[in-house]
Image (tube, rainbow, N blue to C red):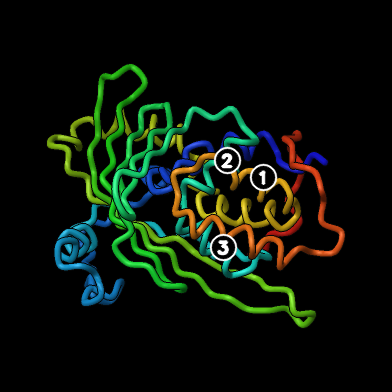
Amino acid sequence: MRILSTRRALAIRIVAAGTFVATLLLGSYALAGSQTVDPASVVPLDKIAPQHREGVAEVIREHTFHRKGEPDTFPCHSKLYLTLLNEPALTLALWKDLSDSPVRLNQVGPGLYKGTDGAGAVATWEFVYRSPKLHVLLCNLEYTTPRGNARLEGRIVLIVHTGYYREVNGEPWVQHDVEAFVKIDSRGWKAVARTVRPIIEKLLEDQVREAGWFVSLMGRLVATYPNWACEVSLKPIEADPRALQQFRETVVQNRRPGASNGRPTIAENVPDTTRRR
């Protein structure tokens, strides 16, 4: 069965690496101007580790850009969703099993990852706070234009808000939205902004729109193709073995009647009918 559009496949190419972080950013953002945001009103600073607390607060307080995406609602078991969000190596492995993607991802420490999209963006990010309803990531981003004539460096605080509910028939659903605060650290970046910004907007236009959609896409595919998801999770993946085992158990326990025994493949521009706003 072919259900995944190649247009969307290309659109989430960067997101797949957990450069999910980089994908949200540096696209169609509005300048923050003199708007001031109290970091404590955005994230629970007292629950963030001391070594990250000031860095998170600085990015939010002195942000260059800010964006909050529209909520995305989709059918998915809460345990599956949290595994896909907390274990980006698994999520990327599922995607790369379907697509010849240049994205690369390495876990370089507990909750710490480095990814590249193969198109000039390199991001290192860390989960600095995790709970079922709130994830906070701190990211260092480097982007080099295709010809190498301009380079941007910045820091990002990425916030994922999540809610869970059940339909009348008992089917579990998830709703999440993504918020990003970006602080450009490159000296003199404003001097090249006129040249660089259109390039970045061109590169990331689709990705910005679809950023929060990637995890929901994987959640829907796992529910529809449980055998495929379990098979991929058995391959060598740089993820917590206990999380992978729990993932397989949850997939099996929540297998839907009529779920496919096969695997998804890429099709041309098939409309998505399971997504809600």
CB under 8 Å between discs 1 and 2: yes
Lower position in the chain sequence, tag 2 or tag 3: 2
- Find residue 38 and report its horizontal and vertical position in percent: 22, 72
What's under tag 1, amino acid-wise? Glu
The residue at the point 82 percent across, 51 percent down is 260
Q: Quadrant of residue 44?
A: bottom left
Q: Quadrant of the N terminus?
A: top right
What's under tag 3, amino acid-wise? Gln
Find disc 3 in the rendering and name its residue: 246
Report, in whole angstroms, how far the alpha carbon at label 1 lies from the one at label 3: 14 Å
Q: Which of the pair 68/104 is nearer the observer?
A: 104
Q: Quadrant of residue 174?
A: bottom right
The residue at the point 23 percent across, 30 percent down is 192
What's under tag 2, amino acid-wise? Lys
Horizontal side of 207 relative to 217 (left or right) equals left
Find disc 1 in the rendering and name its residue: 231
The 10 Å Cα crowd at callout 2, few under 14, some 14 to 19, many 20 or more, is few
Horizontal side of 43 relative to 214 (left or right) equals left
Find disc 2 in the rendering and name its residue: 235
